Image: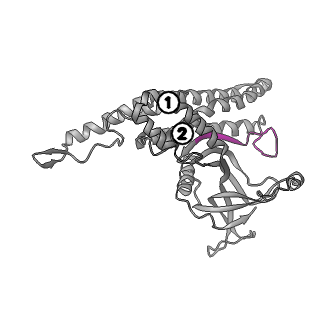
Amino acid sequence: MADVEAVYEELIPESSENNPEPSQTGAVVDGDTAAPSAGEEAHRAPSCLKMMDEKLHPIEEQLQYLLNKADEFQTNLIHSGDRLQSEGFALMVPSFLHTCQPYFTYLESTARNSSPDRTPLPTYIRTRLLQFSQQLCSRLEQLLIMYASFGYLSLEEENPLCISHLYIGQCQVDNIRLSIFRYCLPSPFLTSTDSSMYKRMRWNVERVRETEGGGQEEKKERGMGGRREAEGAEKEEKKEERLEGEQDSTTEYYFLCCEDVPVLEGGEAVREMRAEDRAVRTWSIGRWVQIYPDPETEDIYEWVLCTVPQGQYRELLCLGEEEPSSCIATDCLLELLLSQTDPSSSIRTT
């Protein structure tokens, strides 16, 4: 993919079309505000949408190319009578998934990245980019599930050669950097224990801390004095700050999970399932909290002797009975993180 920032600038409308809807303020004539005519209303929105569709066209072409490649993999699997040939295509699937990763990163970062000095994308463009991401994610899920149904791939995490999940992009909102992963099928939250909790998505969340307090102010002052002369130096400083920030960051793990909760006749949820009870699948977003070995311990023997780390699922947000799309789930997590929701909600051992 082309440089993200360069293409990002191309996606922003050239005049004041940050909002694709036509202006409602009207024009000032002789001190009075004149409402735009019906003809103007009908003209502006379609022309603006057409311009944005033109900017999105090369991105959509890339999506179509990847979707066509996925169709080719599926066609070869279904219509090939040669098992060796099908196995050969199955071996190429991981490489194809790797080929899709830069496109996912481009879509998510372009649609979601935000900072105080960055012009927001029009809502229409942002929505379309996330739709592209969702469309490709769903198609790749279907492809992997089909290959697994023929026995050429494994989606089970117990298998060290499995392809249990997809990387579907990365973004950074303020100081929060998200890497997004989607499980092809609901997978046990912990493979080593029998749990009713199943994971559907995972987010690796890094909270990048500022390492140089006055860096931004110094760059702004220097830019006012001679922006072009300092451009090269600024790029080098940004690169250094990014590398320092990556070293001075911590990673947290958040999950989209589901659980089949037994419900009695009266509608009351219970913790243990009985034969006469019905179950309702509920979805939630929560955080992995390690309890053993203690993450703060300096005793290396605790880590060496621990076969599988033990943790708790800390539920932060209940989403109800309907499974959210990967796009909506990521929106919910970002809203949760940015609002700095108190994480002291219910803790459940897994």
Q: Mark 2 against mark 1, which lies toward the viewer?
A: 2
Q: Quadrant of the N terminus?
A: top right
Query: As shown in the figure, which amino acid type bears the numbered disc 1?
Result: Ile
Q: CA distance from mark 2 to mark 1?
A: 14 Å
- Judging depth in this view, the residue of 155 and 265 nearest the camera is 155
For the rendered model, the colour scheme is one colour
> Is tag 2's residue or tag 1's residue first in the polypeptide sequence?
1
Indicate the position of residue 292 as horizontal and vertical percent values: 81, 59
Indicate the position of residue 298 as horizontal and vertical percent values: 82, 56
Q: Residue at x 44, y 42 (%)?
A: 117
Indicate the position of residue 229 as horizontal and vertical percent values: 45, 27
- Judging depth in this view, the residue of 285 and 170 nearest the camera is 170
Query: As shown in the figure, which amino acid type bears the numbered disc 2?
Result: Ser
Q: Secondary structure at mark 1?
A: helix
Cβ atoms under marks 2 and 1 closer than 8 Å: no
Residue 261, disc: none
Residue 59, disc: 1
Residue bearing the label numbered 2: 109
The residue stretch that appears in magenta: 154-170
